[in-house]
Image (spheres, grey):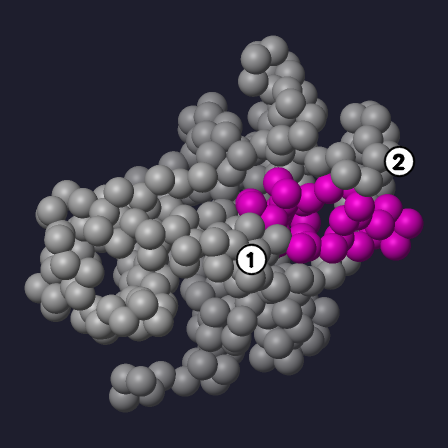
Amino acid sequence: MILFKSVLKDELTDFLELREASKSKCTHDHDRHTLQRFDEYLYTIDCKDKNLLEEQMTGWIRTLTGKSGTIANVVVVIRIFLQHLKSYGVNAYLPPIPKISDDYLPYIFSNDEMNHIFAIADMLQMGQPRKNTLIHIEYPMILRLIYGCGLRIGETLLLKMKDIDLDTGVLKLKYTKGGKQRLVPMHLSLTEILKQYCMALGIIGYPDAYLFPTVDPIEAVTTQSAQHKFNDILELGDISLLGRKKNQRGPCMHCIRHVFVFNSFAKAEKDGRRIDDSVPYLSIYLGHDSLNETEKYLKFSSEMFPEAMDLFDGYTALIFPEVNFHE
């Protein structure tokens, strides 16, 4: 139970309970963090009036850091909360949603880098008893699911045995971005690896067992823990992006999802399939809300694939033509 402390503590508590009842766990966790930060801001500036002014809301937005898309998502949640306040007779200033600058460039691991990453992961030592003694078994499987299916990190870690059909090789993702559910087919080779993993862990026949449990079997490996372990692997493999520009993302675990997309389009081109025909299917497979969201995965910063870069630039110019106006 979160204890808010600002002038809007009661309203924040009620709103969060409403969101918990109607949103996915992932969305609720994001909302909770956002509302906590907003509550802390109101408490810090010693706000006494529930009818928030424009200058107070503008001051709050100035405290936000991160990518423009991240900031916009935070503002959207608070705007929904402020609109909710009207049911209490409170009229607070509704800040506009900041424009999102589309300048993000992901890092694409080369085949050699991915092979190096898998080799290091496969040689991990047993974890500490108080944390997770199974991490050396779990982590290679975590990486292979993200690499082989393009899953998000959080989606992967929340999988339970009841979400996996080892006979058909299909994953059922229940806790995804935007609260959507989707089915994700796996390659036969990946299905076989996953089946062997489940047998080694002894979790077949236990539908509520997490696929990647911690030392406490009722808790899954956290995103933070998984990312921290990946940073260790990058350091061991001496993998980094020298001279990284402001809009470039350095090597990280999420970049493996971008590698999946890159490989998918590369295979489509090799098999003679038009990339623009493949985009709608891949967008659904990835769990995107729109083709515009998939567009971000068609921008590659790596210079190790110059021919493919030209090919993708040509296709994306036709799929996503630039416009001269702002919505």
Q: Which residue is mark 2?
A: 205
Residue 114: image quadrant is top right
The verdict on residue 56 being magenta is: no
Query: In the rendered view, would you say 266 is above or below 141?
Result: below
Residue range (magenta)? 145-174
Residue 43: image location, x then y, percent: 18, 45
Mark 1 is surrounded, within 10 Å at the Cα level, by few (under 14), some (14 to 19) or many (20 or more) other residues, namely few
Could you tell me the amino acid type at mark 2? Gly
Q: How many marks?
A: 2
Residue 116: image location, x then y, percent: 57, 32
Could you tell me the amino acid type at mark 1? Ala
* Residue at 58%, 79% in the rendered image: 276
Dot 2 or dot 1, earlier in sequence: 1
Task: Determine the secondary structure under disc 2.
Answer: loop
Q: Nearer the viewer, residue 319 or 45?
A: 45
Q: Nearer the viewer, residue 205 or 309?
A: 205
Residues at marks 2 and 1, CA–CA distance in whole angstroms: 30 Å
Residue 230 in view = no
Query: In the rendered view, would you say 133 is above or below 151?
Result: above
The verdict on residue 156 being magenta is: yes
Q: Which mark is residue 173?
A: none
Task: Determine the secondary structure under disc 1.
Answer: helix
Q: Which residue is mark 1?
A: 21
Residue 321: image location, x then y, percent: 41, 85
Residue 201 in view = yes
